[in-house]
Each structure stands twice: as C-alpha cells, then as structure tokens.
Amino acid sequence: MYVNKKLLREELAKTVGFYQSNDINLPVISPSLSSSEFDRYVNEVHGLLTTENIQECQANFSRYNYPKYDSSLGYTEGDIVQDNGIVLEAIQNVPVGTVLTDNSYWFELDNFNQYLYQKKLQGIDYTLNFIFDQKKIRNKVKSIYENIRLYDGTANYRDVVSNQNNFVGLRFRLKDDRDLLTIINQIGTHFSEAVSFNLYLYHSSQQTPIATIPINHTKAKSSQWTNQSDLNLRYVSDYHDAGGEYFLGYAQSELGTAQAYKMYSLDWYRGFECGSCSRSKEYWRNYSPWLDVSSFSIAESKFNVGVDLFDPQDVGITNDNNYGLNVNITSKCDLTPFFLQEKQNMAESIKYATGLVIMQDMASNVRGSNGAANQVKQEANTQTVSVDGVNGTVFDMVKSNLRGLSFDLSGLQSECLACDDAKADIIQGTVTFR
C-alpha cells in the first residue's frame, strides 16, 4: 500500500502544527512543530488544546527510536537525531560535521516536544488507517508479483561472453504507472572465476549513476546472489524524469580474466524457447507486462564508467544475452506518491485526528495531584466520544471530517486499485467518501 512509511509520515507531518505560546514559563515548541504548510493548527480543534493544558496532562510515553547522529552525514531541515539520550531537530540544512552544540543548526527537543511529535504521527496513522480500513482500499491494493527471477535454469557453460572493454548489462523499461514500484531484492552473478567489481545503476535522465553496487563474486563457475536494499525502480520519481530507461551494468575491463556465462535459450522479446522445461517462461509472463528487459552494450571509451552517463542513443540493444546477470524482483503498488500529492486535502483530517489523540490522553490522565489536569479531564472525556444529545464533540468532528475526504482516484491504474462492486465505497474514477 505504501512502501516508504517513514517518508509518508515525514511529509504529512509538515501539513499541521501547534501554536507557539507567548508565556515564557511554558515550553518553546520546535520550528517544525510550530509551522504548517497549509495553515492548519491542532490548537484550533478545541479550546482545551492549549500549550498549558497539553503540558499539564502530558502522558508518559516511550520515545521513538530516532536515528543516531552521524558526523559524517549532512542533514535536511526537520531531520531529528539522538545522541547520548539527547534528541535534536535540524532547524536548517546542516553541513557535514556540524557539532550538535551549534544552536544555529540544532534545536533540542525536550519531553514536551517529543510528546507533540509522537501525537502528530499518531494523528497521521489514525487518518491513514481510517482511509485504508474503513474505505476498503487495504484489500484492493495489489502486489503484482513477489520475489521472482528474470529467469531460472542453467547457464550455457560453453557460451562465455568475451571481454571487449565494453560496459554491459541489463536495460529496464517500466510500465507507465506512477503508483507501480519495482524492487530489486537480489542481484545474481555467474562468472567463470571469482572476481570483484562494481555494478552501476544509471537512469537515462541523470548524468551520474544513481547507485553503485559492489559485487564480490567468490564462486568460480557458479552462480551467486547478492542481497540488495533500497534499490527501487519507478516510472515516475522525484529523482529523475518520468519514463526513460534504467541501465544496470559493469565494465568488462574490471573482470580481468573472468568471463560471464550466458543464460541458455534466452530471448527477452518473446520469452524463453524452452517454455515447457523450465520456470523461466512463467517468470517472463509475470513480469513482461510491467517490465521490459533487454541486454545492452556500449564501448567503455565513450564515457567515464561510474562517473558520467553514456549517450543512450549509442547503446547496442540485444535480446539474447544477460552478461552473467540475473535479478530477483518484486513489483507492487505503492500509494505513497498518491497520498503525498493529496496531502493538502488530508491536512484538515490530520489536524482533527491529532487533536483527538491528545484529548484522549487528557481524558485518561492519572495525575491525581495535578489540579489543572483534573479540571480538563471531565470535559476531555465528553469530547472524545459520541454522546447522545451532544452535537459536535471532537470525536464527531474527526469522524465527519474523515468521511468527507474526497479523492480523485482516476489517476490510479486498475492494476493497482481494482474496481469494487456496486456495494463498495470506492470505484475507479472521481470518488467521494461517504
């Protein structure tokens, strides 16, 4: 449904904020928590949601597992790190090596700020879960295929690929679908000798490699698999133009005397000749509607391998080679881009949902000696449920707002969001949640 939950949370968190109090005795709210992309502030949900009331009713909670600060990395405004139990937020883009004591770059998040951050993420999760569960999207979003290889079988040991100082490998073209994600889980290699070299992943719209993958092939005359992470291919991405081509390849000059084995009966255009004697034909039928694969070759002399991009027009394309490479891939629907595009539409719902989860803490607080907390507890109890004769509780407003969310789902392909029957809440086209 959504592959990068961390990214989705981080981006949706920017849609709502909290008012900064003018009372110098109250905590200062961090820059990211006190700002909102769309002018939506949680304090507007109900009069009880003041900084003072939230602080007095603040419940105990477990901190999120924030990433540990790494001085070798740069950080983006809004990033949160921890170091020796201290949690800090980057208040502007942070250059590599900037010390955590530099207050012009870092803001220390006390327990109150961490509490607000957690509640905002809970409000985001509340909203997403409502959309997925109540509106039946969860059961409609499909995985196209899981963990299949480009081919299965035995290489032709008599058919080695001669090294001619070319940059060679596999070219991938993806189906025109912004919500379809292809993940390379593993890369298979098959060479005559043990050899170490770099694989490079290029996109035809980028002048430098988008990934460099070290390969340590230790098995002579044998295939070997190398696990991958975060090696994702998209038709549409924030990092390259829509469409285009991916090239996964290596420089033959790096192989020394090692040679690649060519796969037996390979035909990228029509599947595999021996359709009845291996699973390769079945694999090809699974991925070929979504992923077009072929092999490519270009002279290393035409560009700086691993530094810049060759001219894609100079590449030689063939349908009967694999240059010793195979990949294990998964293709699934990922609605992350869709929800990020719709985040303004979701901001009001996230605001109300965040207010609700804070008021639920107020209603359940057990700080018996805290007079302020006790004063708001009874009213908060009323606001967090639907009560006969009481119209417009916070709970009512949250449910009403979530039900009122409208999305245009016409941009989603039928393969990613299947049509419902007449009784369902969502159909393809312009959809209103009721």
Image (tube, rainbow, N blue to C red):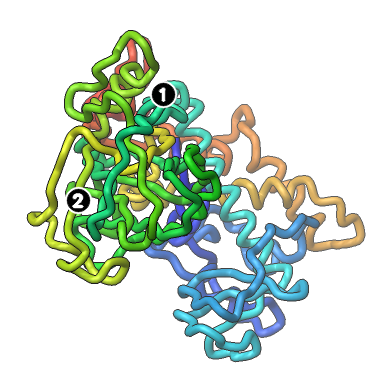
Residue at 69% x, 47% y is 380
How many badges with numbers are in the image? Answer: 2
Residue 287 position (above or below residue 379): above
Q: Which mark is residue 376?
A: none
Residue at image mark 2: 297
What type is the residue that disc 1 sits on? Gly
Q: Which residue is under mark 1?
A: 153
- Contact between marks 2 and 1 (CB within 8 A): the answer is no
Query: Which residue shows up at 46% across the image and 51% down it?
Result: 230
Q: Is residue 351 visible?
A: no
Q: Residue at x 36, y 44 (%)?
A: 260
Q: Which one is nearer the viewer's eye here, 161 or 146? A: 161
The extreme left residue here reads 313
Q: Is 63 or 178 nearer to us in this picture?
A: 178
| Quarter of the figure with residue 311 | bottom left
Horizontal side of residue 113 vs 185, given as left or right:
right
| Residue 353 position in % (x across, y down) | 54, 46
Identify which amino acid the numbered label 2 is placed on: Ser
From the image, which quarter does the N terminus lie in?
A: top left
Q: Residue at x 49, y 38 (%)?
A: 222
Residue 359 position (above or below residue 70): above
Q: Quadrant of residue 180?
A: top left
Counting from the top left corner in percent of width and height, residue 104 is at 53, 90
Can residue 269 be seen here? The reply is yes
Q: For mark 2, give the secondary structure.
A: strand
Q: Residue 368: where, in percent of width, then height?
A: 90, 55
Q: Earlier in the sequence, mark 2 or mark 1?
A: 1
The relative height of residue 250 versus residue 395 in the rendered view (above or below) is below
Query: Viewer-proximal residue, 224 or 242?
Result: 224
